[in-house]
């Protein structure tokens, strides 16, 4: 997950706070932040006192100094909730699985592909079939008004 064009349906499943992170520090660094602290809150210090400097160092270790400075300027003194993004990650996994199925079935049978994917993703073949039969979400859920 390194660019927005590959996210497709998953982008619309992201919380607004994550979309803000992406706008501020980019997708790759936002993913690092979510992987490190998803499901927790993080008090963003002002990087002036010892406590703030410790939190800044922890943030910089995950996203890099430049991105940590950007987040510190934007959220200075606030406690940010870092979402897990479970629905978006699941949608990305399923999207990737469907693409891998298409690749495998260019040279192998569908049954072989499903067996391979079940082992790769540590799930039952039945669940793989269910995922493969799901329809991708449209690129936008917003209806036109007129």
Image: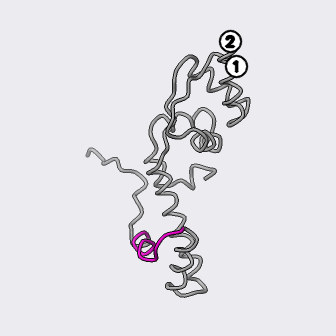
107 lies above or below 119: below
Q: Choose between 40 and 9: the one closer to the eye.
A: 40
Farthest residue to the top: give it.
Answer: 49
Where does label 2 land, which residue?
49
Residue at 51% across, 38% down: 18
Left or right for 13, reference 72: left
Q: Secondary structure at mark 2?
A: loop
Q: Choose between 146 and 65: the one closer to the eye.
A: 65
Q: Is residue 57 magenta?
A: no
Q: Are marks 2 and 1 in contact (CB under 8 Å)?
A: yes
Q: Where is residue 61 drawn, in percent x and y?
A: 72, 34
Residue at 41% across, 76% down: 126
Distance, label 2 to label 1, CA atoms, is 6 Å
**Snapshot quadrant of residue 31:** top right
Left or right for 87, reference 121: left
Which range is magenta? 122-131
Q: Secondary structure at mark 1?
A: helix
Where does label 1 land, which residue?
53
């Amino acid at each position: 997950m390194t660019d927005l064009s590959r996210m497709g349906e998953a982008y619309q499943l992201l919380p607004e706070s994550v979309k803000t992170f992406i706008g501020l520090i980019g997708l790759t660094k936002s993913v690092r932040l979510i992987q490190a602290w998803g499901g927790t809150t993080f008090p963003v210090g002002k990087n002036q006192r010892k406590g703030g400097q410790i939190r800044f160092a922890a943030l910089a270790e995950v996203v890099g100094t430049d991105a940590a400075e950007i987040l510190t300027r934007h959220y200075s003194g606030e406690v940010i909730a870092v979402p897990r993004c479970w629905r978006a990650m699941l949608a990305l996994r399923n999207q990737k699985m469907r693409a891998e199925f298409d690749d495998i079935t260019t040279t192998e049978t569908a049954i072989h592909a499903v067996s391979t994917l079940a082992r790769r993703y540590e799930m039952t073949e039945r669940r793989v079939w269910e995922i493969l039969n799901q329809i991708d979400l449209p690129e936008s859920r917003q209806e036109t008004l007129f």
